[in-house]
Amino acid sequence: MEDRDPFDEMYEALGPELARPWPPISDDEEVLAKPKKAKRSKGDRPTGGAPCHLPVVRAAAGEVPRAIRETETLLLDAGTQIYTRAGSLVRPVTDTVPASKGRTTTIARFRSFCQPSLADHLARVIRYRRFDKRCEDWVDTNPPSDMIGAMLAREGEWRLPPVAGIITTPTLRPNGTLLATAGYDAETRLYLALDRDFVLPSMADRPTRPQAEQALLVLEDLLAGFPFVEPVDKAVALSGILTAVVRGTISVAPLHAIRAHSPGTGKSLLVDIASVIATGRQCPVIAAGKTEEETEKRLGALLRDAVAVVSIDNVNGELGGDMLCQMTERPLVRVRILGKSEAPELEVRSTVFATGNNLTLVGDMTRRTVLCTLDAQVERPELREFDFDPVERVMANRGAYVAAVMTIIRAYQAAGAPRVCGPIGSYGEWSAMVRAPLIWLGHADPVASMEKAREEDPELSAIRELFGHWRKHLSIASGYTTNAVIKTACAKAAGSSFDYGNVDFIAPEFRDLLLRQAGDGGAVNSRRLGKWLGRIGGRVVDGSWLHVRVDGSNGNRFTLCETDAHAWEPPF
């Protein structure tokens, strides 16, 4: 029976006098009428949707945890390049950039996911479907936004693999095995974004000492034109090359500082050689900020991108700071995200260099840095001529230089890792993979340069000067308040004029030291002096140390004490 319009039946019941007030739609007007929706048959899906061969996750209200669980399982099964790092889901990003003379190289970094980028990646490997009540069937849909938001916020509950760093060149695991397969390495938690033009020559699994000596000559030839002051300076340069290649598998490594007296001596070129071997390109540089906070922001940005080599270029004067100390001694560093009240933990897998003219290390950086000094002993060192360009030589056959680094380390391990040096705090892994192989092959100990940096530390010099004046003008083993110390240091000679410019002080050098450390408007500030003495309290220097006895009523008292530390010798 033909279906009838219910309005027609209604008007027929009312009678002919109440006929329909409008005429039927003509053929010409048919195109203006709203077409009826055709009922979709079961199993149909919109055209242009996800491919049918993709695995399916059904999105339903109230089942977000189940959808996330299934999504993670499918991502793991598919080997999708989505990882966890510092409280975020990240993916490796690679670019091909110019290297030198028409060559290109691959650079890599990590990029955190946001909702749109994660939706894009999920839609590539998973087919999401929702239930459509109109057709009473499951139809394709975009990855649900509520599921993606919950997935991004699941810190601590992800089953996706954690990643520590990203490299573009094969490296060695701590046990000496080769990491040369592109992709994620579960043992080291490194991602290798292998440069497509890189070729690693065949190497012996257990190279001999003669093979290691030959490999060392290959690296030493690159350094032929550098004016090293002492053998230890050349050892530090070689240490920088070895460290840059294997840093991804070492939890911590010291900073390599390169300094000279004049511009153009080759400081940045030395860093470029290490960078070209390890990454295939000359090292991008940053400048030290005008304040410690500004430098911290710059270093934090590089850590978030997991940059393989960091170079703080052209440092003027002193180098130090809490962030730099942490990057070179701690495997994990908290970095504050700009504009957010967040400080995620980041694993540090970057080789850190610093260059500067007459660069001086201060504070704790002296024991976190190996120091290389260059001195060309000419007025215009930048005008010197060399027989070859070391960067171009590396780029012509980069794989051979990477293999040389690996051969040196593997030969030392194959020889049973003989003990050739003492321990060095915090840097045990670095010492075993970089420092010891160089000493084993006859080079100076790179760590010996730390003592030179320590001797030049301005704070250490000030402490030594203070202790010397204390012995001369105050009594050992007697406690003094800051006011008593200031009174002694600023005492005037008898008969001295009241004219400031003609005042004769009994201990002018002692007074000058206190003014440098705690001066305020031409006078020594007692509060500042107390803070400085408290900060250096307990530090043993040349067999002496300052004891601080806290007295909240009458003021803290400071006592110079002697110890038997004269017998101590550095472990190198």
Image (spheres, rainbow, N blue to C red):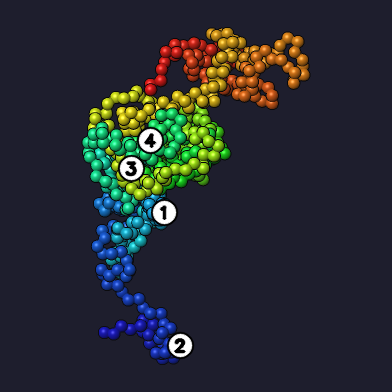
Q: Is residue 74 above or below residue 483?
A: below
Amino acid tagged 2: Pro
Amino acid tagged 3: Tyr
- Say left or right for 391 vs 209: right
**Which residue is at the far bottom?**
16
Q: What is the CA distance from the residue labelled 4 to the residue labelled 1?
A: 26 Å
Residue depicted at x 29% and y 58%: 126
- The reply to whether residue 103 is in sight is yes
Helix, strand or loop at label 3? It is helix
Asked if the residues shown at circle 3 and circle 1 are in contact, with their CB atoms under 8 angstroms apart, the answer is: no
* Residue 61 lies in quadrant: bottom left
The residue where tag 2 is placed is 21
Q: Quadrant of the N terminus?
A: bottom left
The residue where tag 4 is placed is 238
Mark toward the start of the polypeptide (4 vs 3):
4
Q: Is residue 47 above or below residue 410?
A: below
Residue depicted at x 40% and y 86%: 30
Amino acid tagged 4: Leu
